[in-house]
Image (cartoon, helix red, strand yellow):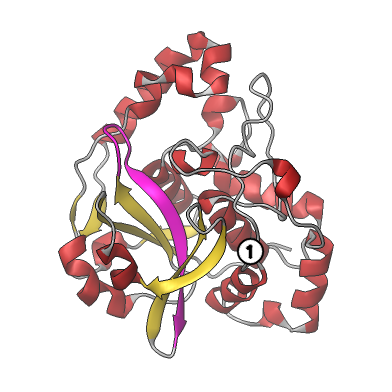
Amino acid sequence: MISSFGLFLGSLPLAHVAQGLSVDVLAKDAEAANVYSQPIGSRMEFFARKFLGTPYVGFTLDQNPKEEKCTVLVTGLDCVTFMETVLNLARTKRPTESSLNKSVAFTRYWNGRVNGYLSRLHYTSDWIFDNDRKKTVIDFSKSLPGAERFTKQVGYMSANPDKYPALKENINLLPRLEKQEKESNQRTKWFVPLASIPEAEKQLQTGDIIALCGGPRGIDCSHVGLIIVENGVPHFVHASSTKKQVTFDKRLSEFLSGSTSTIGVMVARPVENLTP
């Protein structure tokens, strides 16, 4: 999840954000297309396609290190805020800025409550764990062919507090952060190694959330995206720092074949629910 804050994936200045997209426009388009009568995977595909070409923008969640607020920006996205926004637009019937913000906060923070910087789910495996508990997704990795225990440990944030404005602002947060990381490392986690992905991807569905495992020491996952199955092919759709925009990319296994740091993927499947 750390990649959502632009630490490893580059960013564009906020001044470059395209104009014209809004929650109101998205809600009206969804209503016109009768999207909310469809399964959640179809709803997620609808909104994901609406964001294609939207600029990649990092650091949107850390503009004010002194105060943690739930920030939602639809005109510029990084890999995680793209995933979060699509998921929560799909979960929220007739979304407004207020209801979308509330829905995103529920998925972005431990137990759905905003209570300071460390209430945010900073590591992807923690996000999957907590949202499985909250029944917004199912941790689907273990159910896929070739799944194995994931043993890579988290700890990058506590080892590098100078890279995080909120930690630099309040170094007293470190003991709590280290406790969170220790608890995360004690959980049983599953992932699908690269060699098993061609077989596992046959079971992927549109709307599945894909987290790319690997990266520097102390990082569980370095990138996040979604699956859209088109003509039987599970494509990886994501906010790409390389292409500087939300992109409809190659078949997942083909996309991953060009990675030198990814060791496999975690998969979370959205639960079929819809908030009023």
Relative to 147, 79 lies left or right? right
**Magenta segment range?**
215-230
Q: Give the structural element (helix, strand or loop) at label 1.
A: helix
Q: Say which quadrant the N terminus sits in.
A: top left
Q: Say which quadrant the C terminus sits in.
A: bottom right
Relative to 236, 150 lies left or right? left
Q: Quadrant of residue 44?
A: bottom right
Q: Residue 262 in magenta?
A: no
For the point 30% across and 74% down, the residue is: 201
Q: Quadrant of residue 67?
A: top right
User: Does residue 83 lie above or below 114 as drawn?
Assistant: below
What amino acid is labelled 1 in the image?
Arg
User: Does residue 151 lie above or below 190 as drawn?
Assistant: above
Q: Position of residue 224 (x, y in %)?
A: 44, 54
Relative to 276, 3 lies left or right? left
Q: Position of residue 247 (x, y in %)?
A: 53, 66
User: Does residue 84 lie above or below 232 as drawn?
Assistant: above
Query: Which is the main secondary structure of the residues drawn in magenta?
Result: strand
